[in-house]
Amino acid sequence: MLKMYLFPGLVTVAVGIGAFAWGGIDALALVGLLAVLETTLSFDNAVVNAKVLSRMSDVWQSRFLTWGIPIAVFGTRFLLPILIVAAAAGLNPYKVLLLALFDSAAYGAALAHAHAAIASFGSAFLLLVSLKYFFNVKKTVHWFAGIERYFSRWGGIEAIEIALVLFALLSCAFLLPKEAATILFAGLIGVVLSIVMEGITESFSSNTDVAKVGLALFVYLNILDSAFSLDGVVGAFAITALLPIIIGGLGIGALFVRAFTVTLVRAHTLESLPYLEHGAHYAIFGLALSMLASLFVHVPEAITGLIGFVFIALAYWSSRREMLTRLR
């Protein structure tokens, strides 16, 4: 298992040396801070990814760790925010790219201005991911049994989770009329993308072609990673406006999170800790709600991260206690 952390470790050393050579101890400290934040605040992402990754062959699991890195570092944490800023501000993506490369402070301000689009897209996508898990009549393992059995029964209503997400978007748009068009447009993109990707992965679930199944799940995982990471990219600009530092720090974190995800799959952790997946989806639900709340008030990144940490920690503790009870 340790060999999966060799590449992230080597990249960390290389980025650290580059950061120190470029900006001294201050740059190195910022890279380390962002890497730690990205890693520690993404455990819920790793658990959910592990569930999907377990349906992939060993080859595609390795590709998730290798091929997916350029997508995670440069696609999700660099190009995607540029495209969102361009769409939200009505600017040419090339001009936004120049801002990102040569005027990080102005780009950070533009990214903050596009917060409504980012929060709406991310929250809609993640809400569907979490609600789809709980509104499931086939779900038989429950952590908070009273609540989850109730949600499971309501899962018999066709597309109830989509209706709830659309209602949440409409409510936010009603309360924020100046941002209504942005909220609805970005949120609907998140909803449609979630539905399309869920449909594609489900259609391939019974397919015997390993390559097609692996490719579909690979694409879905990278989109899921994007929804998780967008809020973190915005938060990183609250720490520093230096784009190379942000990409380096968040990239290191993304590498370790992906390695941890593969470790969860190879060690069959989800099978031995029955409530860990539940905790991750509660954490996703909390993250989605905090993104919606950020449309109205500033939500500190520490609170967002604490939501995920608390649910994952409680789920781990409950799982261990349950397993010990079964062994007695």
Image (cartoon, helix red, strand yellow):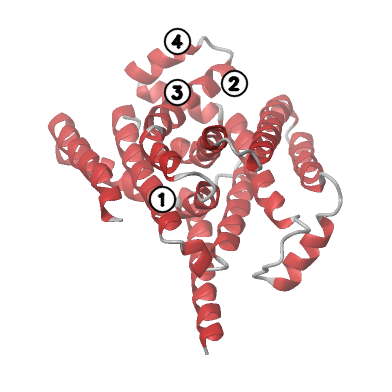
Task: Identify the amino acid type marked 4.
Answer: Lys
Compute the Cα span from label 4 to label 1: 38 Å
Residue that numbered label 3 is attached to: 79
Judge the density around disc 4: few (<14), some (14-19), many (≥20) Cα neighbours within 10 Å: few
Residue in the picture at 55% in, 44% down:
298
- Looking at the rendered image, the disc whose residue lies closer to the viewer, 2 or 3, is 3
Vertical arrangement, residue 107 with respect to residue 18, above or below: above
Element on which disc 1 rests: helix
Image mark for residue 51: none
Task: Identify the amino acid type marked 3.
Answer: Leu
Residue that numbered label 4 is attached to: 95
- Left/right of residue 246 with respect to residue 275 in the rendered view: left
Judge the density around disc 3: few (<14), some (14-19), many (≥20) Cα neighbours within 10 Å: some
Residue in the picture at 64% in, 37% down:
204
Residue that numbered label 1 is attached to: 262
Q: Earlier in the sequence, mark 3 or mark 1?
A: 3
